């Protein structure tokens, strides 16, 4: 089962990489994928990300206050939503309340990056699997992995007020992804709404 983990910004990336390492400890059939971590040197990252978007069975979006309007996060969220069934895309909120989520991300059933929310995320992943682990065994795996005694959210520092998050530089969205993936996200005025502030020409954007 392939799980695409979307991120934007330093804290979001840290959470994404932690999930990448942690998911297989609880669900051994999960193959998590995080851009940058899982792209070999020399590969064209846009094509590789597009391939993973199309082949993934589940999507997790690492959302922080700093990336609520990130064009890259919204783009990948839109592509995931178009590719997957309802309930298979879950925003994971780090230091955020549900009421703070708006726009395209509001269409998804979000979870918080804390004990209860992470457990619900794992249960959702297991439910979507072709051969899910029995509930009792999953409870044991979840406890042994340390998710109950040490919630993931406690591993990360809280954002400072007005903190400027270092961004990852990349090419423009339209030029980075194959047309087959870009068309899945949105088109026309809807595209411009979701990607407000994004240069769709040939200039650089940031992640």
Image (tube, grey):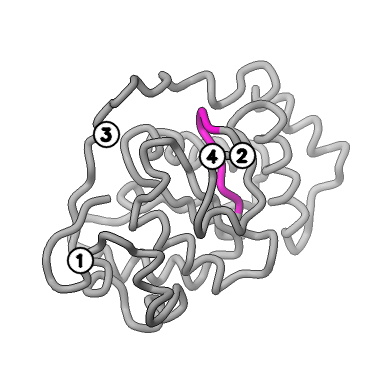
Q: Quadrant of the N terminus?
A: bottom right
Helix, strand or loop at mark 1: loop
Which residue lies at the image location 29% right of the left edge and 26% below the top edge?
A: 162
In reply to whether residue 117 is colored magenta, the answer given is no
Residue 98's label in the rendered image is 2
Image: 186 above or below 173: below
Helix, strand or loop at mark 3: loop
Query: How far, Cα to Cα, is label 1 from label 3?
Result: 20 Å
In reply to whether residue 94 is colored magenta, the answer given is yes
- Characterize the local packing of mark 1: few (<14), some (14-19) or many (20 or more) Cα atoms within 10 angstroms: some
Image: 142 above or below 203: above
Give the x, y percent position of residue 68: 42, 45
Residue toward you, 201 or 133: 201
Specify the segment rendered in magenta.
Answer: 90-96
Q: Which of marks 2 and 3 is in front?
A: 2
Query: Which residue was labeled with disc 3?
Result: 165
Helix, strand or loop at mark 4: helix
Query: Which residue was labeled with disc 1?
Result: 199
- Characterize the local packing of mark 4: few (<14), some (14-19) or many (20 or more) Cα atoms within 10 angstroms: few
Query: How far, Cα to Cα, is label 4 from label 2?
Result: 5 Å
Q: Verify CB contact (< 8 Å) between mark 4 and mark 2.
A: yes
User: Quarter-wise, where is residue 178 in the image?
Assistant: bottom left
Q: Verify CB contact (< 8 Å) between mark 3 and mark 4.
A: no
Image: 177 above or below 105: below
Give the x, y percent position of residue 200: 22, 71
């Amino acid at each position: 089962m392939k799980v695409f983990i979307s991120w934007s910004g330093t804290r979001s990336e840290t959470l994404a990489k932690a999930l990448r390492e942690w998911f297989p400890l609880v669900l051994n059939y999960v193959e998590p994928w995080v851009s940058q971590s899982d792209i070999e040197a020399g590969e064209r990252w846009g094509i590789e990300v597009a391939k993973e978007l199309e082949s993934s069975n589940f999507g997790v979006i690492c959302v922080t206050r700093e990336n609520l309007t990130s064009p890259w996060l919204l783009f990948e969220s839109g592509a995931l939503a178009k590719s997957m069934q309802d309930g298979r895309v879950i925003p994971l909120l780090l230091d955020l309340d549900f009421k703070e989520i708006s726009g395209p991300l509001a269409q998804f059933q979000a979870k918080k990056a804390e004990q209860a929310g992470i457990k619900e995320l794992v249960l959702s992943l297991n439910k979507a699997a072709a051969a899910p682990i029995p509930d009792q065994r999953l409870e044991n795996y979840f406890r042994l992995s340390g998710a109950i005694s040490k919630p993931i959210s406690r591993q990360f520092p809280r954002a400072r007020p007005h903190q400027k998050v270092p961004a990852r530089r990349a090419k423009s969205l339209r030029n980075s992804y194959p047309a087959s993936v870009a068309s899945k996200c949105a088109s026309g005025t809807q595209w411009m709404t979701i990607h407000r502030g994004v240069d769709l020409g040939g200039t650089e954007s940031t992640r």
